[in-house]
Amino acid sequence: MGGEYNADELTEAALSQWLTNEPPFIVCTGGEPMLQLDNSLISALRARGSVIAVETNGTIPVTTLVDWIAVSPKIGTELLQQSGNEIKLVFPQRGLDPSQYESYDFDHFYLQPIDDKKTYPNSVAQAIDYCLEYPKWKLSLQTQKFTGIK
């Protein structure tokens, strides 16, 4: 809906879109969500019963008030968020070795095949092979890539 909001206004705008009786599940994504997601917004959302997840590149530490942390590192950046619920690497990428992340404190380790129309089937095969060889890693597929859903 665009515009500028304070924490209470943004909470009201976001929750006005929630159409079920279930507790709101808010996923904050980017650019880099930790540039805007602060404790006042998180507190306002939580005060209204929300569960909060963040999908970050990990270059800015995530506050402990977030319920689910998903990190997707980018090549050439310093990963400051080295713990969370999941780490997801786009794979394969030159200069990115999944083994460099294996000592970090994540519950789940995922490889997601790189989305390149020419090489996608090969990227899927490479990710599967890596996961079979290194079972700490699991395959993550964006189903819209192969179902044609847009």
Image (tube, grey):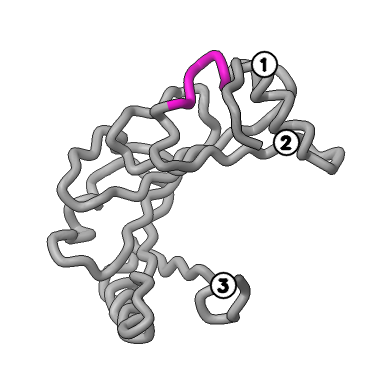
Q: CA distance from mark 2 to mark 3?
A: 24 Å
Numbered badge on residue 144: 3
* Vertical order, 64 against 32 (above or below): above
Residue type, numbered disc 1 = Asp
Answer yes or no: do the residues labelled 1 and 3 have beta carbons within 8 Å?
A: no
Q: Residue at x 29, y 48 (%)?
A: 73
Per the image, label 3 sits on a secondary structure element best described as: helix
What stretch of residues is rendered in magenta? 36-41
Q: Amino acid at mark 3?
A: Gln
In the picture of the structure, the residue carrying the numbered disc 2 is 24
Q: Secondary structure at mark 2?
A: loop
On the question of residue 30 being in view, the answer is yes
Report crowding for label 1: few under 14, some 14 to 19, many 20 or more residues within 10 A (C-alpha): some
Distance CA(mark 1)–CA(mark 2) = 15 Å
Identify residue type, mark 2. Pro
Image-quadrant location for residue 61: top left
Residue 62 placed where, x, y %?
A: 40, 28
Which numbered mark, 1 or 2, is in the foreground of this view?
Answer: 1
Callout 2: few (<14), some (14-19), or many (20+) C-alpha neighbours within 10 Å?
Answer: some
Label whose residue precedes the other's in the sequence (2 or 3)? 2
Which one is in front, 137 or 38? 38
The reply, left or right, for residue 94 in relation to residue 102 is: left
Which x, y percent locates residue 56? 40, 41
Q: Magenta stretch: residue 40 in it?
A: yes
Quadrant location of the N terminus? top right
Residue at numbered disc 1: 8
Please give the name of the residue rendered at 39% of the width and 28% of the height, measured from the top-left corner. Answer: 35
Give the SS element for disc 1: helix
Quote the CA–CA distance across marks 1 and 3.
34 Å
